[in-house]
Image (spheres, rainbow, N blue to C red):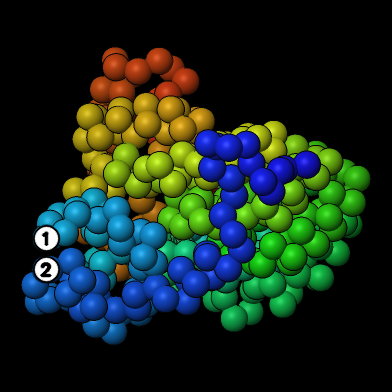
Amino acid sequence: MIPTNPDAGEPGPWAPGIWRHQLKTAIRDSVTLCEKLGLPTGGLDDAPVFPVRVPEAWLRRIRHGNPDDPLLRQVLATALERLAIDGFVADAVAETSRFVAPALIQKYDHRALLIASTACPVHCRYCFRREFPYTDHGPAQLDHAIARVVEDTTLSEIILSGGDPLTLTDTALAKLLRRINAIPHLRRIRIHSRWPVAIPERITAELLQSFARSSKPVVLVVHCNHPAELDTHTARAFALLRKTGLTLLNQTVLLRGINDAVTTLAHLSEALFEQGVLPYYLHLLDRVRGTGHFEVEEDRGRALISGLRNQLPGYLVPRLMREIPGEPAKTLIG
Ligand SMILES: *Cc1c(COP(=O)(O)O)cnc(C)c1O
Ligand code: SF4
């Protein structure tokens, strides 16, 4: 049981409702975002294919007046997204051919990925699912997807993804976790979520209780790209999550001009560890239409990893990965 009245001096979970308010009041255009930060509004894309979404919880970590702020660069839509670049396509990792049921993607043995929600706490400009066909694949198709997981006894892990699965209400998520827990052949439940970093206020008592009650081990893979994303709020969120007994890992996307420096990545691994999170993957960018300006070359990625190896213990060096469509697993680089 997670206490709803935590010990004095130890901050507990956030009240329900705060995170929904954050989502509802998020900034939805680049011009407003720049105005709030005291930045010029030229060169923006005011009607991007993939809409802007920046909640106040993200905004408060962006430094005022700095157009190169690493958190701002991840969320601000600029005219660069309109550039057509050879090799950058809508479905870069060939997901739409890998549905085994509506909302259920399977590429690798023993693991299937469920599009549990179609909405995210923040819109990352480099997102590989920028143009994902969410209208045909989302929570409305859940029953079919679960039926398929029940049938396929070769599966040992289900990955809740999206969108972001923690956009589901606490009640819906509790129900989903109960249904998954009832499937005998599954050995683990994995959740990929940006919420604990983007809006740490998502961590409510009811959410923690769902994780604590899971009879199958839960692995939560969060998504953090830069040490400036980590603050006292994320530390509190991770500490609460860890108390439920789940395993906390992080994945990062290697992004040009944002985190492509050894000092930044080393600082990120150390800051994550101090907050109880281990680095998992460092992804080379998926070549999705509109994201070419974020790409870091593979050789540069390898050089960054050797730099990290010289500075950090092995367990703080993330694995540099690339997804090559058609391969039986993600590919380890270097
Ligand atoms: C990345 C991915 C996984 C998980 O791969 P791991 O190497 O186990 O982290 C599973 N299914 C799909 C469709 C994926 O894209
Ligand atoms: S949270 Fe994940 S799925 Fe959502 S926009 Fe960001 S990268 Fe894409």
Query: Disc number at residue 65?
Result: 1
Point 58% across, 37% down: residue: 8
Asked if 184 appears above or below 39 in the picture, the reply is above
Disc 2: which residue: 39
Residues at circles 1 and 2 in contact by the CB criterion of under 8 Å: yes
Tell me residue 282's x, y (percent): 41, 39
Q: CA distance from mark 1 to mark 2?
A: 6 Å
Point 88% across, 50% down: residue: 183
Asked if 310 appears above or below 221 in the picture, the reply is above
Judge left or right: residue 325 versus residue 27: right
Choose top left, top right, bottom left or bottom right for residue 186.
Answer: top right
Tell me residue 185's x, y (percent): 87, 43
Q: Secondary structure at mark 1?
A: loop
Query: Disc number at residue 110?
Result: none
In the picture, which quadrant includes the N terminus?
top right
Judge left or right: residue 6 versus residue 261: right
Asked if 46 appears above or below 286 in the picture, the reply is below
Q: Would you say residue 142 is visible in this rendering?
A: yes
**Amino acid type, label 2:** Leu
Q: Would you say residue 318 is visible in this rendering?
A: no
Q: Residues within 10 Å of mark 1 (few under 14, many from 20)?
A: some
The one nearer the camera, 93 or 293, is: 293
Point 28% across, 48% down: residue: 255
In the picture, which quadrant includes the C terminus?
top left
